[in-house]
Image (cartoon, rainbow, N blue to C red):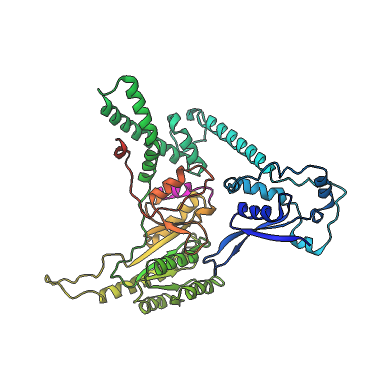
Amino acid sequence: MDLKTYQGSSMAEALERVKTDLGADAVILHTRTVRRGGVLGVGARNIVEITASRDPRLLPAAERRAMAGRVSQVGRNDPPSGDRLRDASAERLVRDLYSARPTSSSVATRAPRSVPSVPAAPPRPFGDLGTQAANLQNEINEIRAMVRELLSRPVVNAPVGHLPDLAPDVPEIPDELRDYYTRLLQNAVAEELAHDVIQRARQRLDDCRARIMAGVAGKLDDAQADKRVRDKLRDLIPAVLMESIERMLPAAGPLEVGASDRGKVVALVGPTGVGKTTTVAKLAAHFKLREGRSVGLITIDTYRIAAVDQLRAYADIMALPLEVVFTPQELAEAIKRLGDCDLILVDTSGRSHRDAQRLADLRQFLDAGRAAVESQATEAQTPAGADGTSVQQSSTKRFEVHLLLSCTGHRDQLIDVAERFSSLGVDGVVFTKLDEAVGAGVVLNVATRLKWHMSYLTTGQEVPDDIEIGHRRRIAELLLQPAGETASPGRSGEAQTSCVDQLA
């Protein structure tokens, strides 16, 4: 039986291998995406598998008859390029085209049979994919045009209750900023915040316009000066919007481990299911493998089934010491035992933000940890200086608590969670599961209310790759990119921009 399976890192690559080996008339029987390689998620990657054959008899009888009665267009219409197939909508079309066909397992166990009641749709050749993708793109463009037209209407005509947090005299969105306003809404930014961003940008552009006009006054005639102003302002719009968003967000606050630090403790807290254990593993891998720091792990998550085993597996892979504790006193003793490590990460059990007793229990653990760190810091003080006072070895904070919030939650719920966990002495916030969120707007919606440092963003399950520092610039980039567009990797640093610097 001429039945083969082809693999590729993308749908385009796997389809190209099918066509190269079996020809343009190949019959696609089954497609799927699997993860291969790595250990416990470390180093795994996505592989696309396509099961195909030259033999059309493997298809149901109705499909074979339909195929025999038509002229294959594969030879006349080349398959779409790899760039087009990499588009998410094109890949979905490929899956839809062949999802009704039998799987490789069913082909191996039984002979194909006809379905006389309802004839199956004839298989569509690769050449049809380009037309369908083009039609889909046209529909998307029409929908976008409709959205822009709706947004162009004055906000004051909105029905009562449509904009509950806005004044009734909200100014109309300027034409040059309307597409960016649409992007903010598509990326789940709350309407009142989206208007705030636009109005900040509008005021900043007015300032820039005045500076540009002052620079060209007397040098150009009116028409040339007007054109120079329009061109420069058009080029400045992305930078001005970026600046407006950055100024609304708190600064990043990643973990800092000084060169002379020993025994810095960082506890991750938050509700159940936000990804604390996975985030601990990512941070441990980053500081151990990329920064060359010695890292120790402590878990007090003894409530959840297999939670200790999961963290122990990560600890074994990275050769890290792991302590399992059950009481606040045991936590203090574990911190002392790991005192020679540069960084100690504490994984806590999930607590409902409405369970006051559980939060009180967690506070006892954290208080015991702080006391142990303070005791070690006192013992590590250097001898008295010339003025008789002791000198600390490092100015970095030795005990930190970082709250994890899932981007899949509703803004009001996340703010409620943050307010209730704030009694634990939170130093920074980690926004997790950004890849599962409707849009990155939830970060802006919540962070503007909390005013805590944004330490990290997590964007998937891969250890240690899917984590990055919560830079304001990174979040602004995510909010201003077209909805559905794949985010590029985060930058290593952030520097707040100023559109005035670009007024050359």
Residue located farthest toward the left when viewing the structure as drawn: 386
Which residue is found at the position 43% from the left and 41% from the top?
A: 193
Q: Which residues are magenta?
A: 437-448
| Residue 81 image position (x, y, % from top left) | 60, 46
Q: Is residue 71 left or right of residue 280?
A: right
Which residue is found at the position 26% from the left and 24% from the top?
A: 217
Residue located farthest toward the right when viewing the structure as drawn: 116
Instruction: Locate the C terminus by quadrant.
Output: top left
Residue 440 sits inside the magenta stretch: yes
Q: Is residue 207 left or right of residue 267?
A: left
Residue 119 sits inside the magenta stretch: no
Magenta portion: prevailing SS class? helix
Please name whichever residue, 7 or 266, is drawn nearer the observer in this view of the structure. Answer: 7
| Residue 124 image position (x, y, % from top left) | 73, 45
Q: Is residue 386 left or right of residue 475?
A: left
Please name whichever residue, 397 or 312, is drawn nearer the observer in this view of the structure. Answer: 312
Which residue is found at the position 40% from the left and 48% from the top?
A: 448
Q: Is residue 78 left or right of residue 404?
A: right
217 over 53 or under it: above or below: above
Instruction: Locate the N terminus by quadrant.
Output: bottom right
| Residue 471 image position (x, y, % from top left) | 39, 52
* Residue 11 shows in the view: yes
| Residue 132 image position (x, y, % from top left) | 67, 40
Which residue is found at the position 52% from the left and 53% from the top?
A: 435
Number of on-image labels: 0
* Residue 357 shows in the view: no
